[in-house]
Image (spheres, grey):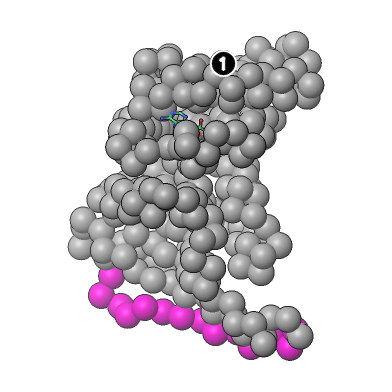
Amino acid sequence: MLSLSFRFSCFTHSSSSHRRLLFLLPSPTISQCCFSVKPIKQNNGNNLQSSSSFSKGSPFSGLEDVFVSFLFGKKRATDVAHMVWKHVVQKGDTVIDATCGNGFDTLALLNLVADESHNGYVYALDIQKDALDKTSLLLEESLSSNEKQHVKLFNICHSKMEEVVQSNAFVRLVAFNLGYLPGGDKEIITRSETTLLALEAAKRILIPGGLISIVVYVGHPGGREELEVVETFAARLSVENWICCKLQMLNRPCAPIPIFLFRR
Ligand SMILES: C[S@@+](CC[C@H](N)C(=O)[O-])C[C@H]1O[C@@H](n2cnc3c(N)ncnc32)[C@H](O)[C@@H]1O
């Protein structure tokens, strides 16, 4: 019998106790699963609604199936992130891939923003030249020359994103896929200090209705500290202006954790 537990946490203050839904399923492999909504202290006394009471038109409506698929191990953290992006990003938007790596996220973003009137841009950043080469190659193989013009690649630390993004750009999404480059040097990883600076920069340039999306990996050295830094940053965002949540599997301590910070 396998017991699967899953936590959907809003970074918020609430006086209510930790609410938990328990499902008993007849499946031979998954007999019990637990979905809980756990309030986390935020810097403001207001209450934030739980996922079950989000109104229609909220950034979460329509995403229930994806969240449940993640819960049952049928979708990866990055798949969940991509689905959430689809709900938020529109054709013609400017978005930032803050850790472009092998280019898969960049390509997914390009497909969301590129439109026929040549609006819509993806700024793709990475500190490794190797990563930019891989992203370039993927774009080369997957896109027409017109489409490629919608992507701007920068070999730069994401904490400096404001130096490369046009000052009048309306940035709808900043996406972070933290950790090391898959298939690359595992010593070169995102670091808490620069991740925090980059989150602060993202907060400054994001438009209302925008999203900071973060996938955090805790299985490598420094990963848990980085998660703590991201959570602390999120918990300090005001309830009036932000909806902040994370999806964490409680009994898979090393599973990647998607975190979403929606600017209202
Ligand atoms: C998990 S990978 C990203 C995967 C990528 N999004 C994809 O779709 O393939 C993390 C990437 O972050 C990059 N990185 C690490 N520190 C960084 C920093 N300070 N600024 C920008 N990129 C950084 C690494 O070089 C690595 O390529």
- Circle 1 SS class: strand
Asked if residue 207 is positioned above or below residue 74 in the image, the reply reads above
Which residue is located at x 28 percent, y 52 percent? 232
Question: Picture coordinates of residue 71 (x, y %)?
Answer: 61, 67
Hey, what amino acid is under mark 1?
Lys
Q: Is residue 188 visible?
A: yes
Q: Position of residue 163 (x, y in %)?
A: 37, 15
Task: Name which residue lies at 55% across and 34% down.
Answer: 185
Q: Is residue 120 visible?
A: no
Left or right of residue 135: residue 13:
left
Which of the two residues, 126 or 15, is positioned nearer the viewer here? 126
**Residue in the picture at 64% in, 55% down:** 76
Q: Which residue is at the front of the view, 58 or 137?
A: 137
- Is 59 colored magenta in this rendering? no
Q: Nearer the viewer, residue 19 or 52?
A: 19
Up/down of 93 relative to 250, above or below: above
Nearest the camera: 38 or 169?
A: 38
| Residue at the image position 49 percent from the left and 71 percent from the top | 250
Q: Is residue 75 above or below residue 22?
A: above
Q: Estimate the x, y position of residue 196 in percent, counting from the top left.
A: 32, 38
Query: Is 99 on the left-hand or right-hand side of 75?
Result: left
Bounds of the magenta segment: 14-27
Location of residue 22 by image quarter: bottom right
- Which quarter of the rendering shows the N terminus? bottom right
Count of numbered circles on the image: 1
Percent x, y of residue 198: 36, 32
Left or right of 12 on screen, residue 111: right
Relative to 243, 78 lies left or right:
right
In the picture of the structure, the residue carrying the numbered disc 1 is 152
Q: Residues within 10 Å of mark 1 (few under 14, many from 20)?
A: some
